[in-house]
Amino acid sequence: MDRQAIGTTGLRVTSLCFGASALGNMPDTYGYEVDEARARATLEAIFAGPVNFLDTSNNYGFGRSETRIGAALRDRGGLPEGFVLSTKLDRDMETGRFDADRVQRSVEESLTRLGLDTIPLLHLHDPEHARDLTEITRDGGALDALFRLREEGVAQAVGLAMGRVDLMRDLLRDRPFDALINHNRWTLVNRSADALFDDAHARGIAILNAAPYAGGVLAKGSAEMPRVTYQLASDEKLAPIRAVEAVCARHGVAPGAVALQFSTRDPRITSTIVGVSRPERVTQSLDWAAAEIPQAVWDDLMTLEPSLTDPEADRDYKPG
């Protein structure tokens, strides 16, 4: 697969990135369990394929995602050459504390679990859920600590990963981030990240668009997974999903392929992060990324009215 640069960091990543949150076993978020054997088989399928980019976080499955990735890496003799691993600094999940000391502890936890000395791409994660935003933004706070880790070589590149677009634009404004991750805000049914992506692209920040399936429903189908952005959804909230499914059914194409390529064909987006939790999903993602989508499908989809509001405004956040 072709690779694009993350700024001037020297990192180059494929247009597809696999997300490893579900590999940490997060049933409160996804509605299903993922045991260690299934997670390992999925990771082996990823490392054996053409994608060179894997994303995780300190708090996915309360550390289980990183632990499982680290075990797989140790058995392989370390991170494969040219492979880019992305992880994230997280607040203390009991207290919500997210100051510079927590940043140091978080990165040390991640390095230990992953069995690495350095992290290719390190993000500050979910500041909107921290107990006090000023712990993050003040002089000597979490953001200063993040950029110090880049200066010290602990991280090769640094980014900001979060949901809320308004706060994200404020936090990105004054600092030289290499990358960003935003999720669920640039999909077939929601376009609320449009201006954010325009601004970031103009500044040369690599855009990593996560959750193009609106939390999974556009991949698995509204009949099988009636959840939108990780929440059980009413018929009203499923209506936009079903409208997309109806267009795809008329043209005989998979909604998952269309949802994925809606992101990958956007010239602003460096890579699209899709969660996988079984080896078959790795293969399916590659097939969807390469599928031929007739122009008539895009024409019909563009007649649908996307939401421009925050898709997680009423989300009951559960970290597990």
Image (tube, helix red, strand yellow):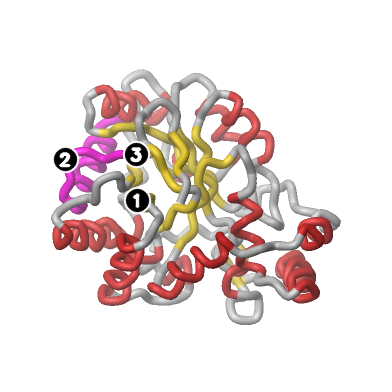
Task: Kindly report the distance in space between the C-alpha atoms of the residues bearing marks 3 and 1.
Answer: 11 Å
Label 2 secondary element: loop
* Left or right for 294, reference 148: right
- Residue at the limit of the structure toward the bottom, as seen here: 223
Residue at mark 1 to residue at mark 2: CA–CA distance: 16 Å
Instruction: Tell me what residue is drawn at x 62 percent, y 36 percent.
Output: 197
Residue 102 among those drawn in magenta: yes
Q: Amino acid at mark 3?
A: Leu
Residue 277 horizontal side relative to residue 85, left or right: right
Q: Nearer the viewer, mark 1 or mark 2?
A: 2
Q: Nearer the viewer, residue 76 or 171?
A: 76
Magenta-highlighted residues: 100-122
Name the secondary structure under disc 1. loop
Q: Mostly what secondary structure, the magenta segment? A: helix
Query: What is the CA distance from the residue labelled 3 to the residue labelled 2?
Result: 13 Å
Label 1 environment density (alpha carbons within 10 Å; few <14, some 14–19, many ≥20):
many
Residue at image position (33%, 45%) is 84
Q: Nearer the viewer, residue 246 or 316?
A: 246
Label 1 or label 2, whichever comes before in sequence order:
1
Contact between marks 1 and 2 (CB within 8 A): the answer is no
Give the amino acid type for the residue marked by disc 1 in the picture: Ser
Crowd around label 3: few <14 · some 14–19 · many ≥20 (10 Å):
many
Identify which amino acid the numbered label 2 is placed on: Asp
Crowding at dot 2, Cα within 10 Å, few <14 / some 14-19 / many 20+, comes out as: few
Which mark, residue 117? 2
Q: Count how many numbered circles sit on residues in the image.
A: 3
Which of marks 1 and 3 precedes in the sequence? Answer: 1
Where's residue 229, x and y in %? 58, 61
| Residue pictured at 50% horizontal, 48% vertical | 15
Q: Which numbered marker is on residue 121?
A: 3
Question: Residue at label 1?
Answer: 57
